[in-house]
Image (cartoon, rainbow, N blue to C red):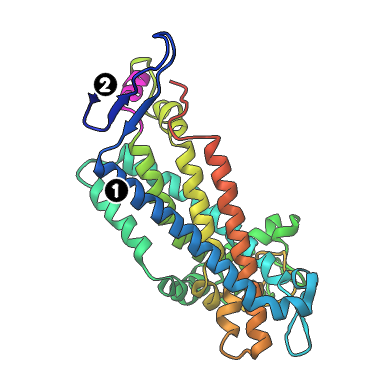
């Protein structure tokens, strides 16, 4: 018997019982450290899956009394009268999606620009400072962003004065022909138009949430961009590429999978954001597709604002809303996994 040893494993070819040209079975014996690490990793992965299953099971059991009464109407009803057995999450479900989409639309270009500047353009003396600042922004509590949005962003930057001068009014004035940017019963060119129609909107809540998710997305993207192969970078320069040409042909293709993963991570945070949305927006249960108009809401904000005053059936209905949010974020993460598996970081580049 021959033992072939290296630093990672012991390979023991078994002695053939037949002719010499028959294939021999090879048994790999891992070192103790590798076996321990594999066992710990397996237990950790199983624990995560188990916790997710327990959370889903808990929400399902707690929500069953309300879901049994409401049926499929729980997903289509635009009302929240738990005592009258007429309740559903249609309005806040649409609001959750719209707030998350507004947040990602604003956060994505900011995060990409921040990550590229830190990893590719910033002088080495100030790059660590910028990294720390971005990480610090990610650690700021969401209530601070909500207070900032309510007391500064909305009244002094976006909706200024009694007529509501600011970005929302400008958008609905020139792009109001787009249904998403129109405002019901509001004439933006009327000097007497009330600013109240433009406050506490999905758009403002989305901006606040975007400020929360931008640091998270930027941090992940920065780490991915920094791992682009130096050889391919130098090869692009050797072929005459400019700085932007190297980024476009090497860094961005290499980090495609990480960019998608970071975006989905930010989207998951945006879907579940609570306090920032509660402070900005007034919960409404009717589907509100106009993002610049007063009203809207999200599932997480609904749970936070109604939990204390709910009866037993109301708590069950809130658990049902939480189950819908849990399922939605799970679908988003599964979709992200499928997309990333087809677009691995570093799988291809144009250099």
Front residue (pair 32, 46): 32
Look at the image and tell me whether residue 209 can be seen: yes
Mark 1 surroundings: few (<14), some (14-19) or many (≥20) residues within 10 A: few
Tell whether 271 sits left or right of 123. right
* Magenta-colored stretch includes residue 236: yes
Tell whether 265 sits left or right of 189. left
Residue that mark 2 sits on: 1
Q: How many marks?
A: 2
**Under tag 2, what secondary structure?**
loop
Residue that mark 1 sits on: 36
Tell whether 289 sits left or right of 164. right
The residue at the far front in this view is: 17
Look at the image and tell me whether residue 194 can be seen: no
Q: Relative to 188, does residue 66 appear above or below in the rendering? A: below
Disc marking residue 78: none
Q: Residue at x 71, y 66 (%)?
A: 189
Q: Position of residue 71 (x, y in %)?
A: 79, 73
The quadrant of the picture occupied by the C terminus is top left
Q: Position of residue 211 (x, y in %)?
A: 45, 61
* Magenta-colored stretch includes residue 290: no
Q: Position of residue 109 (x, y in %)?
A: 49, 47
**Under tag 1, what secondary structure?**
helix
Q: Residue at x 59, y 53 (%)?
A: 332
Front residue (pair 27, 17): 17
- Quarter of the image holding residue 281? bottom right
Q: Residue at x 43, y 75 (%)?
A: 143
Q: What span is in magenta?
A: 228-237
User: CA gap, disc 1 to disc 2?
Assistant: 27 Å
The quadrant of the picture occupied by the N terminus is top left
């Amino acid at each position: 018997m021959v033992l072939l040893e290296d630093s990672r494993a012991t390979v023991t070819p078994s002695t053939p019982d037949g002719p010499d040209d028959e294939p021999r079975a090879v048994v790999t014996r891992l070192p103790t450290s590798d076996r321990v690490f594999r066992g710990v990793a397996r237990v950790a992965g199983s624990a995560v899956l188990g916790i997710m299953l327990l959370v889903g099971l808990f929400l399902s059991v707690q929500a069953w009394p309300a879901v049994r009464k409401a049926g499929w109407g729980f997903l289509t009803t635009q009302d929240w009268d738990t005592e009258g057995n007429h309740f559903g999450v249609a309005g806040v479900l649409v609001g959750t999606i719209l707030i998350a989409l507004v947040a990602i639309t604003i956060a994505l270009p900011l995060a990409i620009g921040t990550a590229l500047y830190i990893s590719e353009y910033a002088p080495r003396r100030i790059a660590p400072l910028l990294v720390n600042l971005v990480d610090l922004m990610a650690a700021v509590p969401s209530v601070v962003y909500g207070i900032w949005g309510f007391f500064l962003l909305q009244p002094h930057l976006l909706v200024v004065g009694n007529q509501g001068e600011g970005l929302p009014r400008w958008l609905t004035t020139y792009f109001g022909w787009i249904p998403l940017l129109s405002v019901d019963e509001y004439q933006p060119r009327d000097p007497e138009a009330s600013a109240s129609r433009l406050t506490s909107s999905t758009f403002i809540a989305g901006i606040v949430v975007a400020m929360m998710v931008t640091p998270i997305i930027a941090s992940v993207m920065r780490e991915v961009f920094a791992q682009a192969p130096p050889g391919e970078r130098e090869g692009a320069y050797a072929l005459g590429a400019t700085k932007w040409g190297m980024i476009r042909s090497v860094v961005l293709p290499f980090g495609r999978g990480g960019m998608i993963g970071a975006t989905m991570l930010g989207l998951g945070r945006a879907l579940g954001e609570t306090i920032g949305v509660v402070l900005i927006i007034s919960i409404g249960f009717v589907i509100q597709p106009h993002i610049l108009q007063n009203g809207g809401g999200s599932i997480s904000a609904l749970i936070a604002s109604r939990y204390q005053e709910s009866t037993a059936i109301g708590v069950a209905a809130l658990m049902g809303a939480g189950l819908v949010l849990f399922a939605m974020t799970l679908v988003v993460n599964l979709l992200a996994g499928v997309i990333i598996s087809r677009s691995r970081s570093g799988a291809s580049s144009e250099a």
